[in-house]
Image: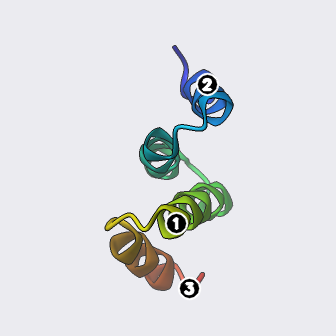
Amino acid sequence: MSLDAELLAAHAAGDVEALITLYTRASEEAVKDVAQGFYLTHAYVFALEAGDARAAGLAERLRVQGRL
């Protein structure tokens, strides 16, 4: 299954854990900086909403990119 299909399925299922993981993965696989920031921001927002411990690391990555 493609990453896009996995993201759509996770959204449809309301699987926040998977969304954090998949958006993080998408940010790592993205070629363009804008896409990296887009996906990383989504991962961060879902992590914040879920109270997930990965939020701190995602925030740091966004800071390094000058996006937070």
Q: Quadrant of residue 58?
A: bottom left
Q: Which mark is residue 9?
A: 2
Please, is residue 36 above or below residue 60 in the view? above
Q: Position of residue 8 (x, y in %)?
A: 66, 29
Which circle's residue, 2 or 3, is located before the other in the chain?
2
Tell me the quadrant of the picture where the C terminus can be found.
bottom right
Q: Residues within 10 Å of mark 2 (few under 14, many from 20)?
A: some
Q: SS for tag 1?
A: helix
Q: In terms of depth relative to the viewer, which is nearer, 23 or 67? A: 23
Q: SS for tag 3?
A: loop
3D distance between C-alphas at marks 2 and 3: 31 Å
Please, is residue 59 above or below residue 13 in the view? below
Q: Which mark is residue 66?
A: 3
Which circle's residue, 3 or 1, is located before the other in the chain?
1
Q: Residue at x 31, y 68 (%)?
A: 53
Q: Residues within 10 Å of mark 1 (few under 14, many from 20)?
A: many
Q: Position of residue 37 (x, y in %)?
A: 60, 65
- For badge 3, the amino acid type reads Gly
Number of the front mark, 3 or 1:
1
Number of the front mark, 2 or 3:
2
Please, is residue 20 above or below residue 57 in the view? above
Q: Residues within 10 Å of mark 3 (few under 14, many from 20)?
A: few
Which circle's residue, 2 or 1, is located before the other in the chain?
2
Q: Which mark is residue 28?
A: none
| Residue highlighted by disc 1 | 44
Q: In terms of depth relative to the viewer, which is nearer, 34 or 1? A: 1
Q: Residue at x 43, y 45 (%)?
A: 17
Q: Is residue 41 left or right of residue 54?
A: right
Q: SS for tag 2?
A: helix
- For badge 2, the amino acid type reads Ala
- For badge 1, the amino acid type reads Tyr
Q: Position of residue 61 (x, y in %)?
A: 42, 74
